[in-house]
Image: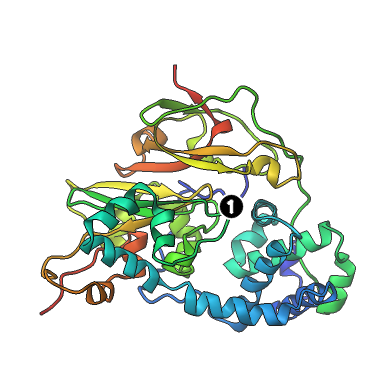
Amino acid sequence: MDGIHDLGGRQGFGRVRHSPTAAAFHDAWEKRVNALYSLAVKSGIFNMDEYRHAIERMEPRHYVAASYYERSLTSLASLLVEKGLVTRDELERRADGGFPLASPSAPGRSNLAGRERFRVGDAVVVRAEHVPGHVRMPAYIRGKRGVVVGESPVYPFPDAHAHGVAADDEPTYDVRFSTAELWPNGADAAFVHVAVFQSYLQRAR
Amino acid sequence: MSAISKPSVAPIERRVDAVESVLADRGLEPARFVVEATLAAEERWVPENGARIVAKAWTDPAFRQRLLADGKSAVVELGYEMPRHHRHLVVLEDTPTVHNVICCTLCSCTAFTIIGLPPDWYKDLEYRARVVRESRTVLKEMGLELPPEVEIRVWDTTADTRYIVLPLRPPGTEGWSEERLASIVTKDSMIGVARIPPPHA
């Protein structure tokens, strides 16, 4: 989905609020959330792709306003409700107040039929697709041309794995794009490398 | 309209309590797991791991070669752990003319067992939106002004492959022990938003 989470290349943001000694946690509840979502994954209640997708499905105003760990908590709670471990009413009763959750999911999809095998050095084009469910192709590479610089072992296909759809695992390719290709006349000169699932790619002709 | 602007939204701690109680009902002993996982996050998955890996790569050419060829095997060989879903670790070697920097525009993925949990600014909207498109500007704002001849390579962690930057060893550290070298390697330098300055004396 072309969600609010897909931030790469969006303009209008100010300076990074950087500190060389930035802490990962600020409050005790953040440590609890970090552990609890991981416990749910470890216990097989949901997988990492479902977890990421439930964050992406948060209502955009909530997503933007929430801290990282509030997004994590919202995903965890949404999936507990969607998986039938608790109802939203019961969650809100226990929290003694409202509990904003993610919006419902669109259907997922399986791997692309006839996907191609690539080698380092191959010129590739990212398929110009608009996927309603979970997808790990950032919008800024859609339809763009790049060069393969690396290949990973196979991973579960996120577009399927986030939705309980059967699919083959597939490799990802590290694809190098020039910023001139991604944002003609609108970016600092650099190369951006993106790990792109095999189903998202086709050979450049 | 927005659910979040309603005064009735429960405070965050109570929402965490509610979720924790659901996991407790399932017999998952969440309170115990919170203690264990927090200990791991704060004491085992620390940037000192990555720092020791970098220092070894600076001093042991054979290890450096193994690390660049297959990062995961090389760090596991040193006794470091990576979660099962991190199936591949790619080590990005800086040179005098190439500078690497990592990010995750879609969420906040990192090799957290190796470089520690990501700092908050890494997960913020600003870094995720801007570093892919305005890398040189963003790095400069963060205090790293690279000479124009240095090529910038940004790596967006969009799959479960993880990246770590192997920063340049600063001049003035010749003959240093691995341990002493490890002490100057920062998390920021392994993300790629800083270079390691030469030691003062």
Instruction: Determine the residue located farthest toward the top in the rendered image.
Output: A205
Q: Amino acid at mark 1?
A: His
In the image, residue A45 above or below residue A138: below
Q: Residue at x 20, y 63 (%)?
A: B169
Q: Quadrant of the N terminus of chain A?
A: top right
**Residue B179 located left or right of residue A27:** left
| B37, above or below A180, in the image | below
Residue B82 in percent (x, y) is at 50, 61
Residue B52 percent coordinates (x, y): 32, 69
x 36%, y 39%: residue = A186
Residue B9 seen anywhere in this rendered image of the structure:
no
Image mark 1: chain: A
Can you tell which quarter of the image residue A167 is in? top right
Q: Is residue A20 left or right of residue B28?
A: left
Quadrant in the picture for the C terminus of chain A: top left
In the rendering, at what x and y percent does residue B112 appear? 48, 65
A202 relative to A87 in the view: left or right: left
Viewer-closest of A154 and A157: A154
Q: In this figure, which colouring scheme has been used for the structure? A: rainbow
Instruction: Give whichever of B97, B83 is nearer the camera.
Output: B83
Q: Residues within 10 Å of mark 1 (few under 14, many from 20)?
A: many
- Which picture quadrant has residue A178? top left
Number of marks drawn: 1
Residue beneath the point at 55% across and 56% down: B107
Residue nearer the viewer, B195 or A67? B195
Q: Secondary structure beneath disc 1? A: loop
Residue located 69% across and 55% down the image: A47
Q: Which residue is mark 1?
A: A5
Residue A196, image x, y percentages: 51, 38
Which of A56 and A76 lies nearest the eye of the viewer?
A76
Question: In which quarter of the view is residue B53 placed?
Answer: bottom left
Asked if one can make out residue A93 in the rendered structure from this viewpoint, the answer is yes
